[in-house]
């Protein structure tokens, strides 16, 4: 699932910059989609319970001390108002997907959706294959005559 979101972001279909960032413990990486207004992290979880407490959520807080360089302070000011959202999906089997808002300091979600995979989605209209009209009888006779006169299409 993460690779599909990464492709969408890189193609410009989603207004985010995708990066893979390490977890606080060196157990792997997760996809983070960022823009000026929001940060969306995509995580696998084994069941539809809340995700484990993650240190990176606290890292979205704003420090109360200025940095030495103005560029660093500008980056912090930009991210200070950014909202954080989670896209949680099934581990191994993609049998659920939830969109949630985490509490930045507690091991819980403030709000979350129902299983997004159970919500009905509009389907594209089916396209019929093949000709829409019957061929004229003269053309069919010509094809049959061609095949029988040449003993098939042996070449």
Image (tube, grey):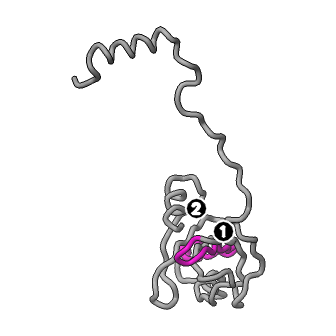
In the shown orientation, is residue 127 left or right of residue 120? left
Q: Residue 52 placed where, x, y %?
A: 62, 89
Q: Residue at x 73, y 62 (%)?
A: 119
Residue 23 visible here: yes
Q: Residue at x 36, y 12 (%)?
A: 145
Q: Residue 104 placed where, x, y %?
A: 70, 84
State the residue position of label 1: 38
The picture quadrant where one finds residue 63 is bottom right
Give 126 or 119, whichever is nearer the viewer: 126
Give the extent of the magenta segment: 70-94
| Image quadrant where one finds the N terminus | bottom right
Q: Which mark is residue 16?
A: 2
The picture quadrant where one finds residue 39 is bottom right
Give 75 or 150, whichever is nearer the viewer: 150
Q: Residue 38 placed where, x, y %?
A: 66, 68
Give the vertical position of 19 relative to 138 (above or below).
Answer: below
Q: Residue at x 75, y 71 (%)?
A: 113
Give the vertical position of 139 relative to 41 (above or below).
Answer: above
Find numbered disc 2 in the image and state the secondary structure of the residue it sits on: loop
Q: Which mark is residue 91?
A: none
Asked if the residues shown at circle 2 and circle 1 are in contact, with their CB atoms under 8 angstroms apart, the answer is: yes
In the shown orientation, is residue 52 left or right of residue 112? left
The picture quadrant where one finds residue 62 is bottom right
Q: How many marks?
A: 2
Find numbered disc 1 in the image and state the secondary structure of the residue it sits on: strand
Residue 78 visible here: no
Please tell me whether residue 39 belongs to the stretch shown in magenta: no
Crowding at label 2, few (<14), some or many (≥20) Cα neighbours within 10 Å? Answer: many
| Image quadrant where one finds the C terminus | top left
Q: Residue furthest top?
A: 138
Give the vertical position of 4 relative to 86 (above or below).
Answer: above
Crowding at label 1, few (<14), some or many (≥20) Cα neighbours within 10 Å? Answer: some
């Amino acid at each position: 699932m993460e690779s599909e979101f990464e492709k969408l972001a890189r193609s410009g279909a989603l207004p985010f910059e995708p990066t893979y960032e390490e977890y606080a413990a060196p157990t792997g990486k997760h996809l983070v989609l960022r823009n000026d207004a929001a940060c969306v992290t995509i995580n696998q979880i084994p069941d539809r319970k809340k995700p484990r407490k993650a240190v990176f959520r606290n890292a979205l807080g704003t420090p109360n001390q200025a940095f030495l360089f103005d560029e660093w302070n500008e980056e912090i000011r930009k991210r200070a108002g950014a909202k954080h959202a989670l896209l949680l999906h099934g581990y191994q089997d993609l049998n659920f997907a939830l969109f949630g808002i985490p509490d930045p300091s507690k091991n819980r979600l403030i709000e979350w959706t129902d299983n997004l995979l159970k919500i009905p989605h509009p389907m594209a209209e089916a396209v019929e294959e093949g000709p829409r009209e019957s061929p004229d009888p003269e053309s069919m006779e010509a094809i049959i005559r061609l095949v029988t006169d040449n003993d098939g299409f042996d070449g």
